[in-house]
Structures are given as C-alpha cells and as structure tokens.
Image (cartoon, helix red, strand yellow):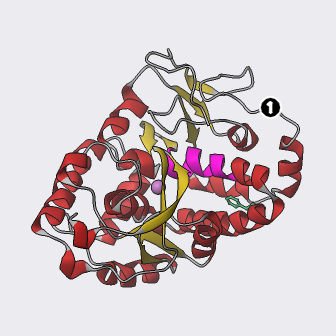
Amino acid sequence: MNDANSPSHGDHQLTDKGYVPIYTTAVVEQPWERYTATDHEVWATLYARQQELLVGRASDEFLTAQQAMGMSPDRIPRFDDLNPVLRAATGWEIVGVEGLLPELTFFEHLANRRFPVTWWIRTPEQLDYLAEPDLFHDLFGHVPLLMNPVFGDYMAAYGRGGVKAHAIGPEALVNLTRLYWYTVEFGLIRQKDGLRIYGSGIVSSKGESIHCLESDAPNRIGFDLERIMRTRYRIDSYQKTYFVIDSFEQLMDATRPDFTPIYARLASLESIPAGEVLATDTVYHRGTGEGWLNDGDV
Ligand code: PHE
Ligand code: CO
C-alpha cells in the first residue's frame, strides 16, 4: 500500500489488536485499477497459504461457500464480480469502505445485507500480523459464509440486534459484541469428524488456524448464549477460550428470542474472565493455559 493507496482517518476504536483508527463512514468504490502488483501478490500469497491450512480445519460450510463464491486466488477480486453471485445466493452484497466503521453504521449495513469490506490490503511486511481488518480479513474471512443462507440470516439478524442494543445502551452493546466476537470472529463448529473453524478472525490467520484446534492451551467449550455474553476476550493474543456450536441452525435458534430481558438480567452479573471454565460448561477441552498473560482481557 503506497501513499496514494492509503486511507484517511480520524477517531479510534477498539478491535482485536488494540485501538485502531475509524475511517470515513462513507461507502467507497473499490479502486481496483490502483492495486499494485505487490497488492495482488500479497492477496495471492495469503490466499494460497490459508487455503492449504484450511483443508481439514475449516468447516465444510465455509469451504463449500468459498467454492460457490469463486473468488480469484491469484489476484484481488473485484467486488463488482462477486456481488451478482452473492446477491443471487442470499441477497447479500459487498460495499467498499476505508476501514472500521462506527458501530451503528456497521449494524445498519448488516441489517440491510450489506457487508462492509475494507478495500486496501496489508503490505508484504504485515503478512502475519496487522492491527486492523484489511481486505484479506474482510473478503477472504467474512464474505464466503454470506453465501450460506442460515449464516447470512444470522448476520442480518445480528445487524438488527445491534441497532436495538445501541439504543438500549453501552452495556447491552458490550454483551452483543462478545457474541459477535465468539461466533462470527472466533467461532468453532462441531462436525461429525471433529471440531472445525468458521470464525473469520481465525480463517484469515495462519497462526490461529492451527492454534485454535491443535494447541492444548485454550479452552474449547460448548456454545451457551448468556455465558458468552458475559465472557471477556483477548484483543492482543490468541483467544483463551473458543466456543463450539453444533450447527448454524443452533446459532439462529439461540439468538432468535428478544435479547432485551437478557441484557437486563446480565447487567447485574459479573463478567467472566476470558480463560475461566465454569462448572456448568460443556467442556470439549480444558485449556492448560500455557502462555496466557494474566491481564488484558477486555
Ligand atoms: N434476537 C436478538 C435481539 O433481540 C437479535 C440478534 C439476532 C442478535 C442474532 C444477535 C444475533 O436483540
Ligand atoms: Co472481522
């Protein structure tokens, strides 16, 4: 990304890697002609690397959706080429943005089946680590599952729920954000042949794709809506705990009820540290905690 390809920004917002700038809220045209040969190479390198890692690690739903979407692995796809495919499948479309959006703007896009995708891509020096979402995370990580009808419905319902939680207040938003974190970004799913990845934050990360399934350090615990909404998370390291769903239908069913009374109930309960295991948890794997830092849960 050279200077002509740099986004402009103002304020800052908390993400999985710390505080990062929020950019203009406007939807922007993907400046496809301005991508450099290096930009396309970064895409191709990351794509090939993750593709290899994800065989046998990503969920069948992710891999199937990815194939149906037909993104080009060798050069950055054009949003305009992907959108007809997406629209026909589930009514979703991609809109280009400069980067993270304010929460309410983001929710409104999702509620209307528009997924904001950051148009710029990381540099070759940032292949393994980046402090904010870029094109690779957004497009490779998030967009394929929008081809899945059940998951697509979940994301739109989440957007509507976000607009509502925003009106209720900041504590409700914290509860809802944890749900996004532990499902959309870092979720695992149980298949007949074992645990698999569906979370975008994992599928777009080389290190975490392996860590979340193969390391003994983290907990792997069965999905429990209210438990998740109380659980703090890590923004600067791999997760201490991953939550496992049985199916996207389970996710839809569990999140269909009105959350208003749940937010009210949770307001009087303590939050749960990121690495804690409760007596009521369905534990698939109890983490050894190796390498965990003792503070910094958010
Ligand atoms: N049912 C939730 C509510 O009433 C909305 C929601 C749906 C939230 C799906 C997240 C995911 O707020
Ligand atoms: Co993301």
At x 74%, y 63%, the residue is 166
Q: Nearer the viewer, residue 71 or 3?
A: 3
Q: Is residue 162 above or below residue 16?
A: below
Q: On screen, 108 above or below 236? A: below
Q: To which quarter of the image does residue 207 belong?
A: top left
Left-right relation of 146 to 72: right
Give residue 196's position: percent from left, percent from top. Answer: 43, 41
**Which of the pair 224/115 is nearer the observer?**
115
Cβ at disc 1 under 8 Å from ligand 1: no
Q: Quadrant of residue 215?
A: top left
Q: Is residue 232 left or right of residue 52?
A: right
Given the image, on which type of amino acid does mark 1 rest?
A: Glu
Prevalent SS, magenta region:
helix
Report whether 249 appears left or right of 27.
Answer: right
Q: Position of residue 131 (x, y in %)?
A: 39, 48
The image shows residue 106 at horizontal and vertical percentages of: 58, 68
Determine the residue positioned at 74% across, 25% down.
280
Residue 114 visible = yes
How many marks overall? 1
Q: Position of residue 156 (x, y in %)?
A: 61, 69
Q: Is the residue 267 above or below the residue 108 in the image?
A: above
- In this picture, which residue range is highlighted in magenta? 176-186
Residue lying farthest to the front in this orientation: 10
Q: Which of the pair 276/144 is nearer the observer?
A: 276
Image quadrant occupied by the C terminus: top right
What crowding class fits label 1: few (fewer than 14 Cα within 10 Å), some (14-19), or many (20 or more)?
few
Q: Secondary structure at mark 1?
A: loop
* Residue 178 inside the magenta-drawn segment: yes
The answer to whether residue 147 is seen in the rendering is no
The residue shown at (44%, 66%) is 9
Residue at which label 1 appears: 270
Which residue occupies 50% across, 21% down? 293
